[in-house]
Image (tube, rainbow, N blue to C red):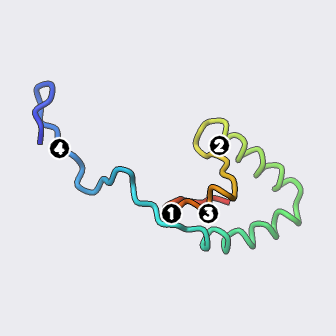
């Protein structure tokens, strides 16, 4: 507990820095199977997905990661 600018400041007890994010690659790959099948059936869905992903990358909400980087990542969250 610290006194800062006229008030007490307490760290969040549940906050880890950096946050613990378990490796969810297998789960993400399993969830991607029906999604990929749906994309193969509908060109409009594929275009919308690509536009949404590009928008998220542009805004900085997501970033593109190479497969080589995934091999060295112990605590990554993976979105397919």
Q: What's the mark number on residue 71? A: 3
First in sequence: mark 3 vs mark 4: 4
First in sequence: mark 2 vs mark 1: 2
Q: Residue at x 88, y 66 (%)?
A: 41
Mark 3–mark 1 contact, CB under 8 Å? no
Q: Which residue is mark 1?
A: 74
Q: Which residue is mark 4?
A: 10
First in sequence: mark 1 vs mark 4: 4
Mark 2–mark 3 contact, CB under 8 Å? no
Judged left or right of residue 5, residue 53 is right
Residue 74, horizontal then vertical, whole percent: 50, 63
Q: Quadrant of the C terminus?
A: bottom right
Separation of marks 2 and 3 at Cα, in angstroms: 23 Å
Residue 11, horizontal then vertical, whole percent: 21, 46
Separation of marks 3 and 4 at Cα, in angstroms: 37 Å
Residue 67, horizontal then vertical, whole percent: 69, 58
- Which one is in front in this view, the residue at disc 3 or the one at disc 4? 3
First in sequence: mark 2 vs mark 3: 2
- Which one is in front in this view, the residue at disc 2 or the one at disc 1? 1
Secondary structure category for the residue under label 2: helix
The one of 6 and 74 positioned closer to us in this rendering: 74
The image quadrant of residue 78 is: bottom right
Q: Residue at x 66, y 41 (%)?
A: 57
Q: Which residue is mark 2?
A: 56
């Amino acid at each position: 507990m610290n006194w800062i600018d006229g008030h007490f400041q307490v760290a969040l007890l549940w906050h880890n820095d950096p946050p613990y994010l378990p490796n969810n690659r297998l789960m993400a790959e399993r969830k991607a199977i029906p999604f990929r099948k749906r994309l193969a059936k509908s060109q409009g869905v594929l275009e919308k997905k690509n536009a949404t992903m590009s928008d998220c990358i542009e805004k900085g909400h997501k970033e593109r990661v190479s497969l080589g980087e995934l091999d060295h990542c112990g605590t990554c969250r993976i979105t397919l």
